[in-house]
Image (cartoon, helix red, strand yellow):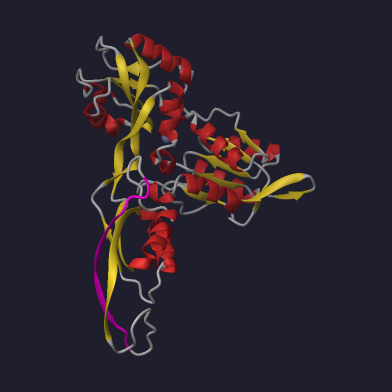
Amino acid sequence: MKVFKGRKMLSLKDIIHTLESSAPPAFQESYDNSGLQVGDPEMEIRGVLISLDVSEEVLDEALQLGYNLVLSHHPVIFSGLKSITGKSQVERIVSKALRNDLAIYSGHTNFDAVEHGVNATMAGKLGLKELKILDPLKGHLKKLVVFVPGEHLEGVRSAIFEAGAGHIGAYDSCSFSGEGKGSFRGLEGSDPYVGRPGALHQEPETRMETVVPAYLASKVVRAMIKAHPYEEVAYDLYALENSYEKAGSGMFGVLDQPMEEEMFLNLLKDRFGLRLIRHSALLGKPVRKVALCGGSGSFLLQKAIASGADVFVTGDMKYHQFFEADGSIVVMDIGHYESEQFTRELFYNLITKKFPKFAVRLSEIITNPIKYY
Ligand SMILES: [Zn+2]
């Protein structure tokens, strides 16, 4: 961190690195546009103002504070811009940010997806334990197989693990290896680790295999090649059908003590500061297992029912979707904004933990566009 005239400065890319190490952009949904919306990664940041949404008022608040980064959950640029003339709210926000050298960064569905993200923050407010992802990501795991001469196995294996491979559930350093024989003949210009160029060679090798999250695959392969003694490393990297249990949509967990449905509704009201909750018919049984999804979670209702949860807490449920609860679960719609409000604390804690003295504040503006009368 640099200090200019008594003020602490960070480069925007340091802050982005902190955010994206916690929630890799690769986890965002295909329709999403998380990431840097406006700004130059090299610019120096004087302070960060955190908001769920970006509005012109939020930009004004940042300017008044002398801050030049607005960090939001919902992206301001979502479906692309064809002009910046000020005819829409999004265009006015972008134009105002550019005119005032304000950067805007948004961490959206990648923060929904990670196991320590939006949903874990919600679950934490309710004191839920034994948290699990409700609908884990698919297509985010790869299998890495590499062939290593025996004496180098440990070195190559630890390099692979250190780079992030080998995690399965609550275990790390997971791998399998078996002995075999590799063959190769170095061609002209080669410099084989054993044998001579032009001569067919057979070498005892170990086939080692492990799993790696897709977003870490190139990092792991680089580390593996660096630790491997061969000039040309023989390895295979292939896609797996397995779910990636550490990221996905929604979450479920259990309360310490089962409670009556009315008591749980009151707990929700209290912890989330709610005026009202829209819910499906109460079932007259205690609530122990709770499924939840910050924001618009209606697409997860069937998964919530299948998880055996007693209630499903989310926002943006439509009239007909309440029928789908069908006596199996109690749907509790607490509002989109209300369900995600603590995402601001999540961002705040992430940045202040890494840069304890840096200027970071939560916006005082309630950006919820929905009002209650
Ligand atoms: Zn949202």
> Which quarter of the frame holds ligand 1?
top left
The residue drawn where x is 41% and y is 12% is 266
Instruction: Kindly indicate the quadrant of the structure image that contains residue 247.
Output: top left
Magenta stretch contains residue 177: yes
Image position, residue 270 (x, y; %): 47, 15
The residue drawn where x is 59% and y is 56% is 40
Give the left or right position of residue 5, taking residue 17 as reference: right
For the view shown, which residue lies furthest in the right direction? 5
Magenta stretch contains residue 93: no
Question: Quick one: 315 or 111, which is closer to the camera?
Answer: 111
Q: Is residue 30 above or below residue 302?
A: below
Question: Quick one: 186 or 257, which is closer to the camera?
Answer: 186
Instruction: Kindly indicate the quadrant of the structure image that contains residue 300.
Output: top left
| Span highlighted in magenta in the image | 172-187
Image position, residue 178 (x, y; %): 25, 61
Question: Quick one: 66 or 282, which is closer to the camera?
Answer: 282
Image position, residue 304 (x, y; %): 27, 28
Question: Quick one: 21 or 163, which is closer to the camera?
Answer: 163
The residue drawn where x is 54% and y is 47% is 18
